[in-house]
Amino acid sequence: MAIDGKTFGICCASAVRALGNKEKTINNLNVFPVPDGDTGTNMYHTMESAQALSCSDGRIGSAARLVSENLLRSARGNSGAILALYFRGFSQALSGLESASVRDIASALESGTKAAYNAVLKPTEGTMLTVMKLCGEKALELAPDFSGSDAGFFEQLCFAAENALAKTTDMLPVLKQAQVVDAGGLGFLTIIEGFLAALRGTPVEYERDPAFDGTRSADFSMFSTEDISFAYCVECIVKKSAAFLGEGTASPLLEKITPCGDSIVFIDTEDRIKIHIHTNTPSVVLDGAQIYGELDAVKVEDMRQQHTALAGGPQESALAAAPSKKYGFVAVCIGEGLETIFRDLGADNLVHGGQTMNPSTEDLLRAVALTPADNVFILPGNKNIELVARQAAGLTGDRSAFVIPTKSIPQSIAAILAFDPDLSPEENSENMESAAEAIKSVSVTRAVKDADIESLHISRGQYMGLLDGKIICASDTPKGCFLAMGEAFADAGFISVYFGEDVELPQAQEAARLIEELSPDAEVEVFNGGQPLYDYIISLDA
C-alpha cells in the first residue's frame, strides 16, 4: 500500500485535532527551554494550518509541499519552528512522488529530522529532536523488510516514539527535576498518533472536554522566574527583498543575532526568513531582520510574565481602560526620578525600559490599552525601542497610537513639553517630533569591558562620554568626559542634568558647576533621575 496526497491530508487533519485535544496536557509539561507553558499551544496553532489542506492533483509530493509552506508561515514558538522545519525536510524527500511507500516515508522521516537538527543552532538531546530522531531510526530499520499495512507501520512508529519520549526525563536535568517528559516530544508523538488513527480509518475528532490521560504535569512554582535568562520570545518572518532572494543569503543575520540569546531556530529559504530566538534585546533582532526585507508576523512575548502566571503569581489587569479623554501618553523610561518627572508632565502610563532593557510589543500594547484616551502618543526614548513601538502602534485596535521617534530621555521630555491639547494628533506629532530633534543628549556611563572604537581605546571600568548615542571620549572620571566634550555644551541655552542612582546630590551639583563653566550663558538645572547604568543623562537645548 501507499499514501497519496488525499490520504496525507486526512492524516494531517487528524494530527491537528489530536494536538488540539492534548494542547493543555502538553502545555502543563513545558519546562524546557523555559517554563512558560505554551508548547502545546504553539505546536497546535502551527500545525492547524494543515487542517484545510487542498491538494488539486492528489499527489503526496504536492500535498506535503503545501503543508510545509503553510507550517513555515504559521510557525509559533521554538517547538512550532522546529516542527515547521521537520515538515520542510519531510516534504523535500517526497518531492515529485504521487504516493509514498513505507520506504519513502522512512526516508522522509530521516530528512525531516536532519532539517530540524540543522535549523537549531544548539540542538539539545532529551527534547522533541530526540523523539524525531529515534522514531526516524526505527522507520529506517523497519522499512526494507516491512510487508504490513501503512497503519501497521505507523503503529510501530508510535511504539518507537513512546519509548523515545519516556527516555527524555532522564536525558535533561530540568525534566528529571520536574519528573516530566519533554513537552515537544509528546507533541510529536501526538502527531504520529493522529496519523495512525487516520490510517486505521478513524481520524481523531475534536473533544469538547478531553479526558485527563494521566500524564504528569509540571509544578511551575518550583522554577524561579529569575532563572529565565532571556526574557523575550521573539519570532518573525521576513519576506526577502529582491537583493536577498535565494537560499542561504541571510547568514550574516544569523551571525548578528546569535550572541543576542538562545533557543535560536533560523530558517533561510528562497524567499523568506523565519526567526525564533529567546533574547533580552528584541529590537536588535528585528532591526537586523528588516534589512533583508519586509517584516511579517512579528511576535514578541514576555516569558517571565508567562511563567509568573503559570506559577500562580500576581498578574497585571488585562482590562483596557475606556477612553475618557482625547489624548494620552505612554513613555518608556527607568529610574524613580525620571518616572516622577514623566508623570508630572502628564504621562498616563510608564513602561520600564532603556538601553539594556528593551520592552516588548506586548508591554507597550498593555500600556496603551490602560491609557484612557482615544489618541495615545508613545515615547520610546531609545532608537532600539522605536521599531517595537511601531509594531505596537499598528495593533492597538479601536484607539489611535502615534510613535514619536525619540532617541533619548531628554528628547522624550522635550516632546511631551511641546504637546498642545488644542492641536490635532497629526499636528502634535509633527511639533513633538520637531521639538525632540532639536535636543542634543550627552550621557556618561561606565564601560563593562575593554574596547577599541575607531581610534579610541576604552578600558573596563572607565567612564565613557556619549553625544547623541555616539561614544566621544573615555576618562577615569566623569569630569574628564565633560571636559573632553566641552564643545557640545558651548551653544546650549538650557541644560538639564539628570543624575543616576549611583550618584550623590553633591557630586551632581559639582558636575553642574563644571557644566556652567563650560557654558556660561546657559541656564543649568539638576534633577534626580535615579536611572541605572548612566551616571548622567544631560539635555542640551539651544
Image: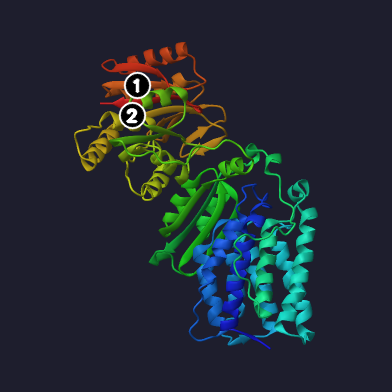
Mark 1–mark 2 CB contact (< 8 Å): yes
Q: Residue at x 45, y 60 (%)?
A: 238
419 left or right, relative to 191: left
As drawn, the residue found furthest toward the left would be 422
Quadrant showing the C terminus: top left
486 left or right, relative to 248: left
Q: State the image quarter where residue 255 is shown.
A: bottom right
Mark 2 sits on what residue?
Answer: 413
Mark 1 sits on what residue?
Answer: 496
As drawn, the residue found furthest toward the top would be 506
Mark nearer the N terminus (1 vs 2)? 2
Residue 299 image point, x, y percent = 48, 52
Amino acid on which the number 2 mark rests in the picture: Ile
The answer to whether one can see residue 249 in this image is no
Position of residue 442 relative to residue 114, above or below, is above
Position of residue 450 relative to residue 12, above or below, is above
